[in-house]
Image: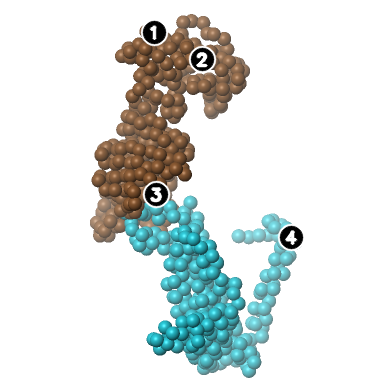
Amino acid sequence: MKHSPGHARVPLWVLAIATVGALFVVLPLVAIVVRVNWGQFIPLITSESSVDALLLSLRTSAVATVLCVVFGVPMALVLARTAFPGQRILRALVLLPLVLPPVVGGIALLYTFGRQGLLKEPMNLFGIQIAFSTTAVILAQTFVALPFLVLSLEGALRTVGTRYEAVAATLGAGPTTVLRRVTLPLVLPALVSGAVLSFARALGEFGATLTFAGSLQGVTRTLPLEIYLQRESDPDAAVALALVLVAVAILVVGLANQAGVRGRFSAGSLS
Amino acid sequence: MTLTFSAALPQRRFDVSFTLRHGETLAVLGPNGAGKSTLVNLIAGLLAPASGHAELEGEVLFGPGVSTPPHARNVALLAQDALLFPHLSVLENVAFGPRSSGASRRTARSTARTWLAEVGAAGFEHRRPGELSGGEAQRIAVARALAAEPRLLLLDEPMAALDVAVAPALRSMLRRVLAHRTAIIVTHDVLDAFSLADRVIVLDGGRIVDDGPTRSVLEQPRDPFTAGIAGLSVLHGIRTAEGLRTTDGDELRIAGGEDLEPGSACTLAIRPSSIRVSASRPAGAGNALRVGISDVEPRGDLVRLRAGALAADVTPATAADLDLGAGSTAWFAFRAEDAVLYSATR
C-alpha cells in the first residue's frame, strides 16, 4: 500500500500527532543502538553470566509457553464455548495478570507456592520446594503470559463461530474429533500468534520473577534481571544485552504478525 | 414410520408434530419466522425442545429426560451456506463423515470419490473450498452430507444463497440424489417443493397449517396462507348447481367440480394473472366480483392489486389507467374455465 501525502486519507494534524507518537516509541530504540559499545559487543554478550542468563531465559520461556498452550487452550474453549453462572467474573479474574503489576503477581505466587504459602502442607508432604528455583521462574512467566494466549484464542474461537462445528457434528464427528479436526485447525493462526505473544511476555518477565524466584546466576537470573543488575556495575554490558532482547522481541513480533496475517486471511475465507 | 416427531418450544411459539415414511421427501414451506429452521435444528440436535419426543428408525432422538447428541443421530444437515471446512481439500471434506464413523483413510477417500462423481464434481478432489464458486461448493456439500450415509437428510434452504443461474442445475442434481431418500427440505420456493418433494407441510407461526401430497396442497390450497405461498387466490363457499356461492353471497359459475355434492363446502382457486380488472361492471356473462382494493404492490413488470383474499396482476399501464389505490373499488372478472373448484376438506 502506498500513501502519497496528496491522497492522505486522514487529516494532516492526525498524521502529525501520530508521527510524534511513533517517534516516542522508536527513538529509545535508536538510543540503545547509538549507545552500544560496538567494539566490545561480542565479548560483552558472550560473557559467562550473559550466556547463562540468555539460555535460562530462552529455556524457561519455552517451557512457560508450552504450559500456556496446555492450560490456555482448554481455558479459552471453556470461556468461548460454554455458558455458566459467574463466567464473566471468572474471565475477568483469569485476565487479571494482564493489568496487575508483575511484582504483585510475584507476591501472590510467593504466598501460594512459597515455604509459608497457601499450599505449604501438600507441598511439604511431597517434599516440593518451588520458591527461588528455576521452576519458580517458569511459574512466574506462565502466570503473566497465560492471559495473552487465552485472550487471543478466545477471540478467534468466537470469530470462527460454531457453524462448522455443528456441521461436523451432524456428519457424525464426536466432540473430540470436532475439536481435533475442525476447531483447532480453524483457530491455528490465532493459537500460533497467541503462543508467540506469550513467549514474548515470558521472555520480558521481570517483577514477578525477581519477587518469587530471586536472582541467582544460572538458576533464576533471566536476561531482564541480568540487564538490571549489570546496569549498576557494567553499563556497556547492560546496553549490549538490552539490544539482544530488542532483537529477539522484534523477531517475535514479526512472527506474530505473520501468523496474524494468515489468521485474517483464513478468517476472510470463512464468509 | 421412519421419523416420528413431536416437539414444543414455547419461547419460540413452536408446536409441531408429524411423521415421515421411509424414502419420503418432505418439503417444509412457510414465511420467515414460521419455525422452519427451528424444526431442522431440533431434528439435527442443535436445539433442545422444552417438551416432546422424536424417534428415527426406532432410535430416540429426544424425549423426556433424553437427548441423543448430534453426532450420534445419523442426521446430516445441509445449510444455506455450503460451510465446507476451509482447511481441508474437497476430497477430505467429503471423506469427513466416513472418517468420523471410523472408516480407514483409504476407504473414506474411495467413498468420497464415489459421492463426488455422483454430484458431478469428480474433477474437484484437490481443490480448496476457497477456490470454488457458490454452486460448486454447494454440490460438494451435498456429496459430503450423503457420504456420511445419514438415515435422514435435512436441507435448510439449500438453494437460497445461490445465483439464480446455478440453482436449476443443483435442483436437478438434488432431484436425482433425493429420489427414494428420507429427507426434509426447508424452502420458500414452491418450485423446490414441486420438483423435489412427495409431500408438503406448511408452517405458520410455529404450527402446521397444511399437510399433504405436494400437488394436492399447492394446487388445491385450503387456506389463503398456503394459497399465497403457491401463488393462488382462494375463495370459500358452498357448491351450487352452476358453481359456487361464496361466503360473501356472490354466485359464481365454474366449470368442473362435478364430483362435489351440491351444498357441500368448497374452495375455489384462481391465479392472479387470470383476473381482469375494470373500473365498472364488465359486459358479458362471465364471473365478476365487486371488490374493495386493500393494497397495491409493484412486482417488477406487473402490479399486484389485493382485495382481501383475492389478488389480481395487471400491467403498470392498466394500473395507471384504472388509477386504483387502497380503499377504492373495482371489478374482478375471470372466466369459468380459469378457476379450479374442489372440496374444502382433504
Look at the image and give the colour of chain B. Answer: brown
Q: Residues within 10 Å of mark 1 (few under 14, many from 20)?
A: some
Q: CA distance from mark 1 to mark 4?
A: 84 Å
Question: Given the image, on which type of amino acid does mark 3 rest?
Answer: Ala
Residue, disc 1: B242
Residue, disc 2: B332
Q: Who is closer to the viewer here, B333 or A256?
A: B333
Q: Who is closer to the viewer here, A111 or B174?
A: A111
Residue, disc 3: B48
Does dot 1 land on a helix, a strand or a loop? loop
Q: Tell me which chain appears cyan.
A: A
Position above or below: A232 against B276: below
Question: Given the image, on which type of amino acid does mark 4 rest?
Answer: Leu
Q: CA distance from mark 3 to mark 1?
A: 53 Å
Residue furthest to the right in view is: A13
Q: Quadrant of residue B295?
A: top right
Q: Give residue B336's position: percent from left, percent from top.
A: 41, 11
Which of pointers 3 and 1 lies earlier in the amino acid sequence?
3
Q: Are marks 3 and 2 in contact (CB under 8 Å)?
A: no
Question: Given the image, on which type of amino acid does mark 1 rest?
Answer: Glu
